[in-house]
Image (tube, grey):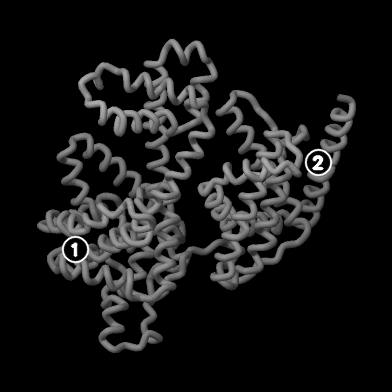
Amino acid sequence: MITEVRKRTRKTVFKKGVKPYIGMLLVIFIFSFLDVFYSMGTKEVDSKEEMLDMETVEKKDVDAVEEYIVSMSVFDKVPEFVKTNVVKRLARRVATAHPSVLNSLSSNQEFFENHMGEVLFFLIAGMVVLGVIKFFLTRPFLVGQCRYLMEARFQRNVRIRRIFAPFGDKKFLRVYTTMSRYNLFSILWWLTIVGGFYKYYQYYFVKYILAENPNVKWKQARDLSKAMTDGYKFTIFKTNLSYIYLTLLRYIPFVPLFITTPVRENVSVEMYFWLRKRPDIDRSLFIEKAFDEEAYIDRIEAGENPEDIKPVYLMPDFSISGSSFDENDHYSLRDYIVLFFIFSIFGWIWEFSTSMIDGHAYVSSNNLYGPWIEVYGIFGIIFVAVLCRFKNNNQKFAVATVLLGFIMECLYSFLLVFHNMKMSSKDMSVISAVINRFSFSELFLFIVVGFLCAYIIAPHVKNALDRLGEKKTKVLCRALILLYVIDVIVSAIVYYHK
């Protein structure tokens, strides 16, 4: 089994061509970057983001936490080399894992300096609580990546939107519930250590079973995975272990992203399909007939025409009412007005929440009194206006989203730096500050927001306004504009008299 799985993985990843390879990398990078699963493929980006996190906290606060941890009695007999290269690094990671938590604690300097033990407790508790919340919020979406990689085994090019297929037709709640139970039981078993290893391999194929059949309940997926792995757990372990050399190459730039991660993810897919063929298990939950066929690359090598290999899946594409993934949308002036205020209000809520958490006080990035920040509204309607022109061309849409996201991140960084530093736009130090502040995570966030604006938010708003009716929509638009104009006038008068 091991030799065959390795050979098929190599074919699927590297022998289908450049376009399928790039699509696979993009999907894996999206999910790993969003913390849906840990990937060494984002190591280079993670190091940059760690540096950015350091810039959002006071160095003296981080040093104080680090010094306290290193001086704990439990580390007295630890060699100095280990203290310097391991303990200090872990201590710094604890201090900067969630900068907002450290900033909140250090806002009371007397408490921070005199109760460092309690500070450390809250830092660790914050890491655990926020980590668990993120884990349960994001992990269920791993089913989408599994679905994409499974289909990539049977066809040359898979549309990226197939990552949403398992969540369509009101199946999201079922998938989320099942994956949440899977994650919960996995965590509980890991508390026993030995049981964690055993159950890890026993539950190995739960997410792939769900990716094929989202209607499967937790106990059904668990029992089927147990049956598939019965007698093969050690084989699965040895198969993964056979790629240990890729882990050793993780320090070579881009190897984790371009080789290690895609190979490891596709190995699991190949093992699923290998053990899926077992005649001694209940196969009633395997609903995709296309998955019973041979792999795409094997069919090509057998002499089949690539044009004739078009798998038909039982699971349809994810659809959104009133919007298409293949057709451009058209919006009227009323749609853009309402979208502008929705994005502006969301921006105000976002900044209000983050400033209250970080500084315990609201610091607005504009001079208006109303619950809106115009820059978010402008960015939002630019995303909608530009990207909706390319929805009928996946390649152009992808390029436009990345370019627009890059431009938005640069503009956003410039506005933040310009506002915070109170500098003239002619000051060259602003440019260097923008470069230093540039964040890959925010760039990626802008790309995701652009996708959501074009495919989900804007179509839903347009549908809601259509249901509301033309008369009521006009009243709504006029009311919003009137309130905004009043806010501008009042803010200008107050500012003038200052």
- Considering only order in the chain, which callout, 2 or 1, is on the residue closer to the N terminus? 1
Q: Which residue is mark 2?
A: 484
Q: Residue 71: x, y in percent? A: 32, 18
179 vs 46, left or right, is left
Which residue is painted at 83% across and 48% down in the image?
Answer: 478
Disc assigned to residue 282? 1
User: Mark 2 is on which residue type?
Assistant: Tyr
Q: Are marks 1 and 2 in contact (CB under 8 Å)?
A: no
71 vs 222, left or right, is right
Q: Quadrant of the C terminus?
A: top right
Q: Quadrant of the N terminus?
A: bottom left
Location of residue 76 by image quarter: top left
**SS class, disc 2:** helix
Say if 4 sits above or below 340 in the image: below
Find the residue positioned furthest to the left: 231
Neighbourhood count class around disc 1 (C-alpha, 10 Å): few under 14, some 14–19, many 20 upward: few
- Judge by depth and name the residue closer to the eye, 90 or 81: 81
Neighbourhood count class around disc 2 (C-alpha, 10 Å): few under 14, some 14–19, many 20 upward: some
Q: Residue 480: x, y in percent? A: 79, 44
Location of residue 457 by image quarter: bottom right
19 vs 39, left or right, is right
Q: Judge depth for marks 1 and 2 and give the one in front.
A: 2
Which residue is painted at 73% across and 41% down in the image?
Answer: 427
